[in-house]
Image (tube, rainbow, N blue to C red):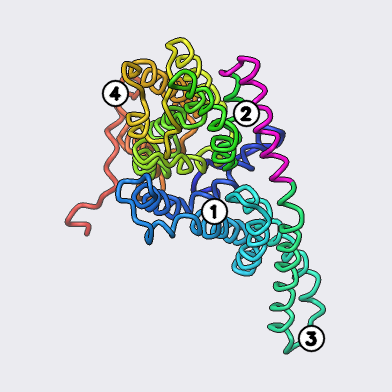
Amino acid sequence: MAAAYTPAVSGSGLKAGVQRLGGHLAGMVMPNIGAFIAWGLVTALFIPTGWLPNKHFGELVDPTITYLLPILIGYTGGRMVHGQRGAVVGAVATMGVVVGSKIPMFLGAMIVGPLAAYLLKKVDAYIQERTRTGFEMLVDNFTAGIVGGAVAVFGVWGVGPIVRQVTKGAGNGVEWLIHHHLLPLASVLIEPAKVLFLNNAVNHGVLAPLGFAEAAKNGRSILFMLESNPGPGLGVLLAYLMFGPRSLRPSVPAAIIIHFLGGIHEIYFPYILMKPRLILATMAGGAAGIATFMATDAGLVATPSPGSIFAYVAETPKHGWIGVYLGVLVAAAVSFAVGAALLGFGRFAEKKPDGDGTEASGAAAPATGAAEPATGADEPADVPPAKTASPSPQEA
């Protein structure tokens, strides 16, 4: 399944291993990108700060990102490892990590889904040869239930404390950088934390309280833009649109609209999880945007929620337009440039086959030329031209 989204990887070593890991992540996430887009549309429309606020429809938002999307990823990852049985136990195991944490557990789903399926695969290999005839269905059902339930319990018990420590560490690191006036370096922590879906914890748990305190004194704060800047994500999506794998490009325009106009940054996280090296692009773009904000003394009056360009319009103070939007554009441009370079400017995109399975690059041309009779100076003058292979009407 991963091969449908990333080029085939050959060879061994660290680089090949990382590429294979990225392929497996793509195989788990990208088949479900339609569900991410559906959630993004619902969120952008119906949350209280959305285009069409609706409390009843807005109730879809939290259960979808908390339960449905991680379970879909765990299901797909389990299916990649052990077929339908692996998909079932992968979904059950993912439920454990979902319950064990208060944030969307996409990364946890990518771990426990394939892990549960792999364990079931090993159990099946051991049990099937030892199962008496007539008991196959009973044994299969119980082994799947036991493995799925055990991994789910482990997820509840083991994942919650780990996630809490990661969240606390990211928040403390960002706060230290702020106090030591090293704001551009905050992107080194903020952007990876965002991709791990800790964006709300970092923004509303750390940056927003500090930003409101600063805004109370100065009327605006740069801290409101450290995490919410839509520029880095826009740059990565544009790089995907122009230079990413061809099978993914059709999904990018909708993601750009949901991210940049709707303010739902989570929509671009799967694209980075598919190719983890692109986190460097968002880090570079975020740092460039923050440096621009600092150079122009830009700031917002409150937290833009969601992080849409329209929310930036609403929260920009009077006479502060240039610095705010210049920072967004610079962040997008730097992120795009770095992302395009990391994608090889399209060199890594798989070649598109034509209808008969051959490359659409004129590979059949040499065969056509070889069928023509050889003529020229090297041919003896007294040798008559060769007859064509097709029979005459009389011979037919």
Residue 197 at x, y percent in the picture: 57, 43
Mark toward the start of the polypeptide (4 vs 2): 2
- Residue count near mark 1 (Cα–Cα under 10 Å), binned few <14, some 14–19, many ≥20: some
Give the residue at mark 3: 132
Alpha-carbon span between mark 4 and mark 3? 83 Å
Q: Is residue 172 magenta?
A: yes
Magenta residues, start to end: 162-184
**Which image quadrant for residue 21?**
top right
Name the amino acid, label 4.
Ala
Question: Quick one: SS at disc 1?
Answer: loop
* 331 shown above or below 296: below
Alpha-carbon span between mark 2 and mark 1? 32 Å
Name the amino acid, label 1.
Met
Q: Which residue is drawn at 55% across and 25% down?
A: 283
Give the residue at mark 1: 1
Give the residue at mark 4: 381
Confirm or deny contact between disc 4 and disc 3 (CB under 8 A). no
Q: Residue at x 56, y 37 (%)?
A: 194
Q: Out of 380 and 214, give the one closest to the viewer.
A: 214
Residue 189 got which mark?
A: 2
**Which image quadrant for residue 58?**
bottom left
Q: Is residue 27 visible?
A: yes
Q: Residue at x 27, y 32 (%)?
A: 384
